[in-house]
Image: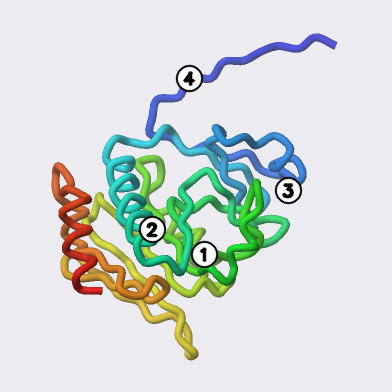
Amino acid sequence: MEVYEITLKVAPPFLLVKPFVTEEEFYRDATEDSNWEYLDGRLVMHSPASNRHEDCFRFLITLLSAYLDERGGAVVRGSRYPMRLDEHWSPEPDLLVVREERRHLLTRTRLEGPADFVIEIASDSDPRLAVREKLPRYREAGIEEIWLINPFEQIALAEVKEPSGYASRHLAAGRLMSRVVPGFWIDVGWLWRDPLPSTLVCLREILPAS
């Protein structure tokens, strides 16, 4: 049987989808350098992250990591670490936070079950993907706190689980407090600055108020 190699050149931004993939295949073939997510039985690959996306990611994970180093109570992980929700869903949020009492669910290769708090940053390849596909699944999983950051529209969607359902807020500016990480907050306006503000300066603002 002859095998032909086909090289496909696609200019970014792009989103590639490979359907009909099993969970076993995903975890067998995935590496820490893979760009694939496993969403609803499909492999979904984004084009390489933009400079703006990476700046926003670095800013938020630095703030959260430093805050939790100081105050404790939870751990944060960045993208490329799957959150297994079921046999068809292992999304990789840009950031996920797990309370200390659930830390045992962090295995070598994945989080077994939903995080307590996730943050998604809209990508150039499909800015609405998180709202369209991930948010409904995150709600179904009962994730307590969800932040969706959209630098293109300069809006943050924050959702918190309440007994009656999810309470939603859209913020273009102002203070956004976390419920899962007590005392942690950001000024949403920080995220739209170019360049982004100093994480050290922002952390000094956050810590005295907590």
Q: Which tag is nearer the camera, tag 3 or tag 1?
A: 1
User: Tag 3 or tag 4, which sits nearer the N-term?
Assistant: 4
Q: Nearer the viewer, mark 2 or mark 3?
A: 2
Quick one: SS at disc 3? helix
Identify which amino acid the numbered label 4 is placed on: Lys
- Which image quarter holds the C terminus? bottom left
- Residue where numbered disc 4 is placed: 9
Do the residues under discs 2 and 3 have CB atoms within 8 angstroms?
no
Of the pair 70 and 63, the residue shown nearer to us: 70
> What is the number of the mark on residue 98?
1
Q: Earlier in the sequence, mark 1 or mark 2?
A: 2
The residue carrying mark 2 is 69
User: Circle 1 sits in a helix, a strand or a loop, which is it?
Assistant: strand
| Residue 195 sits above or below residue 139 on the image | above
Q: CA distance from mark 1 to mark 2?
A: 14 Å
Q: From what the image shows, is residue 65 above or below residue 24?
A: below
Residue 131's place in the image compared with 163, above or below, is above
Q: Judge the density around disc 2: few (<14), some (14-19), many (≥20) Cα neighbours within 10 Å.
A: few
Q: Which residue carries the number 3 mark? A: 23
User: What's the amino acid at mark 2?
Assistant: Asp
Secondary structure state at the residue bearing disc 4: loop
| Disc 2 to disc 4, C-alpha distance | 43 Å
Camera-nearest residue between 187 and 162: 187
Mark 2–mark 3 Cα distance, whole angstroms, equals 34 Å
The span from disc 4 to disc 3 (Cα, nearest Å) is 27 Å
Residue at horizontal 72 percent and vertical 44 percent from the top: 20
The residues bearing labels 3 and 1 have C-alpha atoms spaced at a distance of: 23 Å
What type is the residue that disc 3 sits on?
A: Glu
Q: Position of residue 9 (x, y in %)?
A: 48, 19
Q: Nearer the viewer, mark 4 or mark 3?
A: 3
* Disc 1 residue type (three-letter): Val
